[in-house]
Image (tube, rainbow, N blue to C red):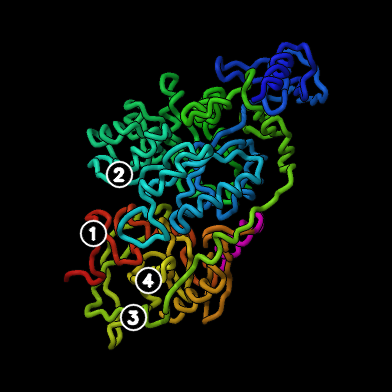
Amino acid sequence: MTKEFLKKLIQTAAGTIPADTVIKNCKVFNVFTGEFVQGDIALCGDQIAGVGTYSGQTEVDAGGRYAVPGFIDSHIHIESSYLSPEELGRLLVPHGGTTILADPHEIVNVCGIQGLDYMMQAAERTALDVEFMLPSCVPATPFEHAGAVINAPEMAEPIQRDKVLGLGEFMNFPGVVNADDMVLDKLMCAKQAGKLIDGHSPGLSGLALNGYAAARIQGDHECSTLEDMQERLSLGMYVLLRQGSACHDLRTLVKGVTPANSRRCLLCSDDRQPRTILEEGHLDSHLRICVEEGLDPATALRMATLNAAECFRLYDRGAIAPGYRADIVLLDDLKQFHVDRVWIKGVLAAEKGEYLLPVERYPIDTVKGSVRIRDFSVDKLRMGLKSGHVHAIEIQPGGVVTKKGVADIPLDERGEFVWSSERDIAKVAVVERHHETGNVACGFLKGYGIQAGAIALSIAHDSHNVIAVGVSDQEMTDAVKALEKQEGGIVLVKDGQVISSMPMPIAGLMSDQSGQWVAEQLEVIHEAAYTQLGIHRSVEPVMTLCFMSLAVIPELKLTDMGLFDVTQFQFIPVEAEA
């Protein structure tokens, strides 16, 4: 801020000179008192000058609507939307989103710091303010090959960046609790830079949770029960109430929000796919749920604004008050939270559901060509089993947790699996795609329902190798090769032909197309998966498969290094003991 601007701001606030813009005739929400006050909002450049009775060079009639601060999503992975940062901003802003706290964990696992660089540069092209958390766990586990390894030395430069607020969700909570030396180095990297540390500690409780909190982990979005929530709040942590496309915790947790603890509660998406945004919205949807569950609108709005701003030290926003950022949302009501208009830094950015500003995309050259597979052929899928009594990953519909099952499968004379329509078991493979190691691991998936062809993805949390499921080795091979040719994304194959696909040239994780196109294409893919491949309609075919390699979610998963028992925290053979 210059001295000249400060003078203008003070004079505007005092009413001695006209405001640049005045939003007149609105009910202004005061986050500090919880009241709605009838009045005008005076804007000076990118800041709010004051609330009261003002005149301005430009005057906008709010028509008696509610004026509230811009919404802040306290934890989201842009990559999980399958959209570029610019495109996600285009979708979120009309729903009142003005700031998001983004953890680019997925693309950094694929492309390293170069992936972070791309995300930060692309984010500058959207009106949505994207603040970043530096991924803390790359790779997420030592039981798979990721595209990069980021330890404390590699964190030293990016943690100092202005738009990097701290370390992203620290998923290696056992490493924190056990005071692992390399983990301590990462934590110290953030502390020495004066930055935050965000949390991720599902199921942790008691003294172990005390140990985790002692590292001054700021908050946690992995609460699934009221007990989880209350314990973390009692230890001084913030709780991020999550409502995404995959995980729906908000209705459960909002019942635990009280006048005594509400200021430590935030709202977050974690992941938000285009179809969800287009049909349900963003934090406007979260606010609707909060009110439906009995929370008063003022408390819910604080959770979406001031609470998040204070938690992440964004002290310039989160309120409509003199000297704050001019991020303002006009709402038609306090029940449906229908968004009429959105200002970001004093600029009208959206109106009546439409993003008003140009969408200029940053070049994706640095993150293209990320699918690199060495010497892949049908022979890589051969297993040569001695016994048909095998461990199987059992899908549990509606979630990403799996069961460690056992099954008896038919084998041919070479010890190779023979798919049968009478058994709901298919072969699953993970193919390393970052360093051309040639690694391929195979296992068996139960409950997916596939009856024909194969499906392959380059989205496989958290290291994002290629994962494929099919009724034959040849169909799986055809799917993997087609996926490699289109530079990642999603491919469905039947009888050796691609029947549906969605290229994702941005690190094999994100499309370069519009949100509407991605939503429509995903719908086509889902319908083809159900009607042509026979996948169970109770299973989300893409998202379910994405998580079958996530070696931190119980009970059994498959990485490019083998079949991993999460409960025992070790690899196990495919063949089970009799």
| x 23%, y 73%: residue | 389
Q: Which residues are magenta?
A: 513-528
Q: Earlier in the sequence, mark 4 or mark 3?
A: 3
Three-letter amino acid code at disc 1? Gln
Relative to residue 6, is residue 160 depicted above or below?
Answer: below
Q: Earlier in the sequence, mark 1 or mark 4?
A: 4
For the N terminus, the image quarter is top right
Where disc 1 sits, the SS reads strand
Relative to residue 18, is residue 281 depicted above or below?
Answer: below
| Residue matched to label 2 | 183
| Residue matched to label 1 | 570
Where disc 3 sits, the SS reads loop
- Outermost residue to the bottom: 413
Q: Are marks 1 and 2 in contact (CB under 8 Å)?
A: no
For the C terminus, the image quarter is bottom left
Residue 34 place in picture, x, y as percent: 56, 17
Three-letter amino acid code at disc 2? Val
Q: Earlier in the sequence, mark 2 or mark 4?
A: 2
Residue 122 place in picture, x, y as percent: 61, 49
Instruction: Answer with left or right where residue 68 lies relative to residue 568.
Output: right
Three-letter amino acid code at disc 4? Thr
| Residue matched to label 4 | 437
Relative to residue 104, is residue 444 depicted above or below?
Answer: below
| x 66%, y 27%: residue | 326
Residue 247 place in picture, x, y as percent: 45, 46
What is the C-alpha distance between the residues marked 1 and 2? 20 Å
Q: Are marks 1 and 3 in contact (CB under 8 Å)?
A: no
